[in-house]
Every structure is written in structure tokens, then in C-alpha cells.
Amino acid sequence: MTRLALLAASLLLSACASMDKAQCVNANWTAIGMEDGARGRTLDRLGERRRACAEHGVQPDAERYAAGRNEGLKSYCTYDQGFRAGRGGNAYSGVCPEPAATDFVAGYQRGREHYGMQKRLDEVNADIKKTKAGLSEPGVSPRTRGQLAERLEDLSREAQQLEQQLARAQSRR
């Protein structure tokens, strides 16, 4: 299923760069570049657009695209956007120029910490659910029941600590 999801995502992403003849002919390359920059896309995106438009005999205006992308990167390369990208578990492609990259990366690292804690909390909560299910099964030996109860206490403590850390991380943002 994971392979299928990755294939679907890559098809969707490649479809996003596809442009029909009318879009290529009438393109506002500054606006397209600005949108790509605001989404943190790499310059590879221009290559995808170039290939799509080449099928229609149209050459993108790389200079206008780059100017628009640089303008769009100004809204992307911020601490808050870095935090959102990191918290969402997204990869960072190194698109931000200095000095904006410093702020973006600081936010990104903080967001990745948040992402890691949230991911661990989700795992712990899933383990809590499984452990509770194990405790309620009929025929569980007293020894196993004791081990499960102890595990449940440990997991509950860890979940509580993670929730507190997440709350602190959110307030420091």
C-alpha cells in the first residue's frame, strides 16, 4: 500500500507541473515562479514546466520565472513556514537563500522536534490501546496481567511527559 501511495503522490506531483498548450502560451512566468517560490519548490520545477511546454513548442521565460520564484521565496523562507514544514514532517530542500535560511532552518528544526514528539506520542497511545486490550482479554495469567499493568503505567507516564513537552514546545514557538 505504501508503494501505491508513493506512486499516486508522484503522479499527482508530476501532473501539477504539466501544462496544456493554452497555459504554456498564456503563462505569466513571474506569477508561476512566485507561486512555486511561495511553496518552497526547487528550480527543478522550472525544468518540469520547460519539458511540459516543450511539447507545445513553448519556451518558458526563465528570467521572469526566477524573479518571481525569488519573490515567492521571501514569503516561504520564514521561521513560521519552517516550523510548519518541520511539524508536518516535510523535507527541506535547501531553497532559502541567506540570511532567510537561518530563520527558516531554526523554525524547521523546532518543528521537526515537535513532529518527532507527536509521532512518539501517537506510538505510545497505540501501545496503550494494545496494552489495555491485552489486560481485558480473558484467561490472562496473573503474572502477565501484572506485566501488562506495569507496562500501562510506564506508557501512561511517557504519554503524559510527551504531552507536557509538546505543550511547552508549542508555547515557545
Image (cartoon, grey):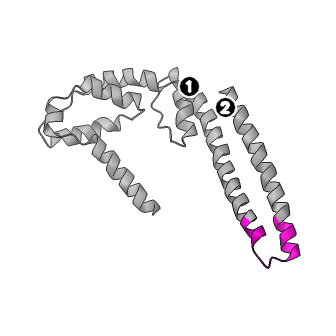
Seen at 33% across and 48% down, the residue is: 12
Instruction: Specify the quadrant of the image occupied by residue 152.
Output: bottom right
Q: Nearer the viewer, residue 62 or 90?
A: 90
Q: Does residue 41 appear left or right of residue 171 in this picture?
A: left
x, y percent for residue 36: 35, 31
The vertical placement of 60 against 128, above or below, is above
Secondary structure predominantly adopted by residues drawn in magenta: helix
Seen at 28% across and 41% down, the residue is: 17
Name the amino acid, label 1: Tyr
Q: Does residue 162 appear left or right of residue 48 in this picture?
A: right
CA–CA distance in space, label 2 to label 1: 14 Å
Seen at 77% across and 77% down, the residue is: 138
- Give the labeled residue for mark 2: 170
x, y percent for residue 113: 65, 39
x, y percent for residue 158: 78, 49
- Give the labeled residue for mark 1: 79
Seen at 74% across and 38% down, the residue is: 165
Q: Earlier in the sequence, mark 2 or mark 1?
A: 1
The vertical placement of 42 against 80, above or below, is below
Q: For the N terminus, give its image quadrant.
A: bottom left
Name the amino acid, label 2: Gln
For label 1, count other residues whose C-alpha is less than 10 Å away and answer few (under 14), some (14-19) or many (20+).
many
Q: Secondary structure at mark 2?
A: helix
Q: Nearer the viewer, residue 63 or 49?
A: 49
Instruction: Specify the quadrant of the image occupied by residue 29.
Output: top left
| Residue furthest bottom in the image | 139
Query: Which dot, 2 or 1, sits closer to the camera?
Result: 2
